[in-house]
Amino acid sequence: MTQSLLNELSRRERQIMDAVYRRGSATAVEVSQGMPNPPSNAAVRAMLGILVRKGVLKIEKDGPRYVYRPASPRRQAGRSAIRRVVETFFENSVEDAVAAVLDTASVKLTASEIARLKSIIDKS
């Protein structure tokens, strides 16, 4: 699966992927429960099939039910999502994106987190 596929998902497809990533694996019912204002069960199942055909989800049979798992690791998908956010909302400025995250009142970094970020910055 290529990262460009993850970038080309519709809003509902991204919501499904979010639900599956949050759980690690999920049935259609669990996916539906993890979505905001979910569509019908049949629509969720149809979109899961589409995501399997696109190669972003894997499917396996577990007794009478089908279980869906991401085709790529969460960290890899997260990096792709961050790149998309930086491109879309911050005009490719990593500095502006990081500043926006750190400017939120809810962000409280520990000393070890600050040290790790400094190390990452020094390496780049």
Image (tube, rainbow, N blue to C red):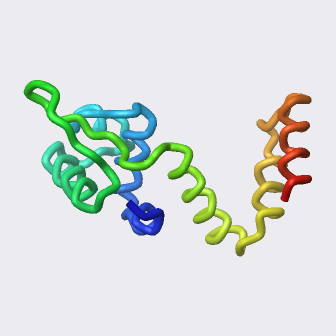
Q: Is the N terminus in the top left, top right, bottom left or bottom right quadrant?
A: bottom left
Q: Is residue 91 left or right of residue 116?
A: left
- Which residue appears at 83% of the width and 34% of the height? 113
Above/below status of 115 relative to 43: above
Above/below status of 86 relative to 40: below
- Which residue appears at 77% of the width and 64% of the height? 94
Q: Out of 83 and 30, give the one closest to the viewer.
A: 83
Q: Residue furthest front?
A: 123
Q: Residue furthest bottom?
A: 91
- Which residue appears at 62% of the width and 57% of the height? 82
Q: Residue furthest top?
A: 63
Above/below status of 61 relative to 103: above
Residue 9, quarter of picture:
bottom left
Q: Out of 7 and 124, give the one closest to the viewer.
A: 124
- Which residue appears at 55% of the width and 59% of the height? 80
Q: Is residue 17 left or right of residue 109?
A: left
Q: How many labels, in total?
A: 0
Q: Is residue 111 left or right of residue 37?
A: right
Q: Is residue 124 left or right of residue 40?
A: right
Give the percent coordinates (x, y) of residue 13: 34, 56
